[in-house]
Image (cartoon, helix red, strand yellow):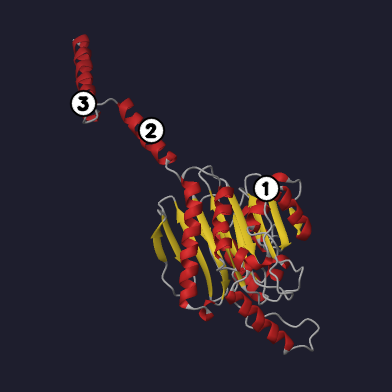
Amino acid sequence: MKVIRLCSLFVVVAIVAAVASNYSRPADGADIRGLHTRANRQADARQTTPSFVLVAHGGAGDYSKMSQEQIDERRTTMVRAIRAGYAILSRGGTSVDAVEATISVMEDSGLFDAGRGGYYTRAGVPELDAAIMDGRTLAAGSVAAVQHIANPIHLARLVMKKTPHVMLVGAGAEEFAKSQGIELVSPYYFYNEREWQRFKDAQQAAKNNASALYPPAWPNDHEHGTVGAVALDQAGNLAAGTSTGGTVMKMPGRVGDSPIIGAGTYANNESCAVSGTGVGEYFMRNVVAADICERVRYLHVSVEQAANDVVMKELVAQHAEGGVIALDPQGNVATPFNTTGMMTGAVRADGKISVKGWSTDAAPVVVSAAE
């Protein structure tokens, strides 16, 4: 009898196990390995979706004194510049290439204080600065006080690629440019009526204050048109670049923060990429770009907090105008500025370009990255 009862118990257990197995079987009849395979395919698809970011700026300052026509022209040019960088990133190109392409468009436009739109020195001739940095290798190149280079950002890239140096200045930088097949342009290339009138007004203001040893530059020069870009490519590498003509009526030979690695330009895959705009002397004294990245790296704060603490606290405490664009390896973006405006534009893999910042209350303008 005991044997019979044990056999009956085994039969019941077997039946319960079979029923439970039927309830747990996938509804579509596929085995569990099939479910795992589909889940893996979905995860792989998510991982292979292109991810990249590009952010550009057109200078921090007081946009309230700028005509609506000029604001519209700058905004249109920024969209065109970002499209150039987006085209590179969307096909798997490098962040360094995207940064250079974006800045080159703004240099060529004559609408910003960079390249063809560079401000005039007291000698009446623009002197241009630029820098670019690769966050993957920490390679960097910069040029300063060049007078005959249409695209200083390109020459800075060549310094990075073709020389053992980081910075070349003045005549030496232009000799190097000639050795690389770059044609030197006439100072007349940089002439435009708007900047010439700004120079003449500043010149008159300096004459009115002739008793000063170093008469101030343009007394109402709160419009900064420095340009810059930061990018994160599909390989996860960061880059930053900045280009400028400096300040109105600056002394010949004056160099600001833009070409100084760590001051106005910095990129490191371990932390972030930064391009700055504002009063360069303060950015150099505070090593602004590197300070933001080192806060991210060593204090483990977000890039937004790091950028805000430096721009909105450190610089404000010193009455220093300016702003930055900052980007971390996860694609987080920060664009703080302590002026009345800083035009910025950003695009991600979805192809939507958002341009904002010409005033603190202006709604962003969103356009497609498709031409």
Foreground: disc 1 or disc 3: 1
The disc, 1 or 2, on the residue closer to the chain's N-terminal end is 2
Residue beneath disc 2: 40
Q: Quadrant of the C terminus?
A: bottom left
Q: Distance between the Cα atoms at labels 3 and 2?
A: 25 Å
Q: Amino acid under label 1?
A: Leu
Quadrant in which residue 109 is drawn? bottom right
Q: Nearer the viewer, residue 352 or 361?
A: 352
Which x, y percent locates residue 1?
A: 18, 10
Foreground: disc 1 or disc 2: 1
Q: Amino acid under label 2?
A: Asn
Determine the secondary structure under disc 3.
Answer: helix
Residue beneath disc 1: 138
Q: Does residue 94 appear left or right of residue 210 in this picture?
A: left
Determine the secondary structure under disc 2.
Answer: helix
Q: Distance between the Cα atoms at labels 1 and 2?
A: 36 Å
The answer to whether 201 is drawn above or below residue 241 in the figure is below
**Residue 294 at least partly seen:** no
Q: Which mark is on residue 22?
A: 3
Mark 3 Cα-neighbour bin, 10 Å: few <14, some 14–19, many ≥20: few
Which x, y percent locates residue 79?
A: 46, 61
**Residue 155 at least partly seen:** yes
Q: Are marks 3 and 2 in contact (CB under 8 Å)?
A: no
